[in-house]
């Protein structure tokens, strides 16, 4: 059996049940050997509107202290909010603020200015997506869509490839590995996730062909830091350690 390709891995902080608090989460990820984290733009303490310039420097200093980078920011607003008149203005403003946060943190660390969101599929969303893509360009950040199928690349969005989302869609004509290979340079964020009979599971223990997916990840131009996504997974500490052990580069201290 071929060995799995190994990468410097990032750990997504969105969806972690424990530990609580950014400092504790970063320390925990570092102890497991992760080289980066994906910040949770919806969490108290890391929401863009709550972080002053000094607060952003503090976040960057915390990452540097643990020799970690930032692979980007997640902002999991319900997709329907972007076209719901009761929520659309606030959703767009939150994305704009988070794009600036992603750009600021990237400038202060060795990270990437990427913001991941899930977009609605309705045609009426096209104008909203075009406006958000323009805000990303103005902010000097990349806006990446985790939805599947991805409809908005023609409007300036990049791809956040999330295997579990692709598998949930039920589309049988394309695998996560093929989706990643087709996205190529447009894949601004590459997730490590998987789907079992009852929901998300440890990558490689469900329907995802982990070897094929990691081989595809290794061909993405410019390098890639796969993001381990633990949303909805039971026993997160065990899974986080297992994925790092199977797919992550060993940290030399």
Image (spheres, rainbow, N blue to C red):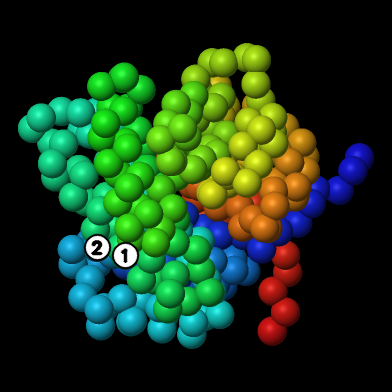
Q: Residue at x 44, y 53 (%)?
A: 142
Specify which label sits upstream in the sequence, 1 or 2.
2
Kindly tell me whether residue 210 is visible in this rendering: no
Tell me where residue 204 appears, x and y as whole percent: 68, 38
* Any part of residue 117 in sight: yes
Relative horizontal placement of residue 185, taking residue 38 as reference (left or right): right
Question: Mark 2 Cα within 10 Å, few/some/many (few <14, many 20+)?
Answer: many
Residue sitting at x 57%, y 16%: 171
Residue 148 point in image, percent of width and height? 48, 27
User: Whole-percent x and y of residue 102?
Assistant: 37, 63
Q: Quadrant of the N terminus?
A: top right
- Give yes or no for contact between labels 1 and 2 (Cβ–Cβ under 8 Å): yes
Give the left or right position of residue 193, taking residue 92 as reference: right
Is residue 122 or residue 163 the one in the foreground?
122
Q: Name the residue located 69 percent from the left edge and 48 percent from the top edge.
A: 220
* Residue under numbered circle 2: 48
Per the image, the residue denoted by label 1 is 101
What x and y, as percent, mark residue 23? 37, 74
Residue at 73% x, 41% y: name it.
216
**146 above or below 207?**
below
Quadrant in the rendering for residue 146: top left
**Toward the viewer: 162 or 1?**
162
């Amino acid at each position: 059996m071929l060995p799995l390709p190994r990468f410097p891995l990032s750990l997504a902080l969105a969806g972690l049940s424990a530990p609580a608090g950014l400092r504790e989460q970063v320390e925990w990820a570092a102890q497991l050997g992760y080289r980066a984290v994906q910040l949770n733009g919806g969490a108290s303490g890391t929401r863009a509107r709550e972080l002053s310039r000094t607060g952003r420097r503090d976040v960057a200093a915390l990452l540097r202290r643990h020799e970690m980078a930032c692979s980007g920011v997640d902002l999991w607003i319900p997709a329907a909010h972007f076209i719901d008149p009761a929520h659309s203005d606030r959703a767009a403003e939150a994305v704009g603020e988070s794009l600036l946060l992603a750009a600021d943190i990237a400038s202060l660390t060795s990270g990437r200015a990427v913001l991941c969101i899930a977009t609605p599929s309705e045609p009426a969303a096209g104008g909203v997506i075009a406006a958000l893509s323009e805000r990303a360009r103005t902010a000097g950040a990349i806006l990446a869509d985790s939805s599947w199928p991805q409809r908005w690349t023609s409007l300036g969005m990049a791809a956040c490839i999330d295997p579990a989302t692709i598998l949930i869609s039920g589309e049988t004509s394309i695998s996560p590995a093929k989706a990643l290979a087709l996205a190529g340079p447009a894949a601004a964020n590459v997730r490590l996730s998987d789907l079992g009979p009852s929901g998300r599971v440890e990558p490689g223990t469900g329907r995802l062909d982990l070897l094929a997916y990691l081989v595809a990840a290794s061909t993405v131009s410019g390098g890639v830091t796969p993001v381990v996504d633990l949303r909805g997974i039971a026993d997160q500490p065990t899974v986080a350690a297992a994925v790092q052990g199977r797919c992550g580069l060993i940290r030399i201290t």
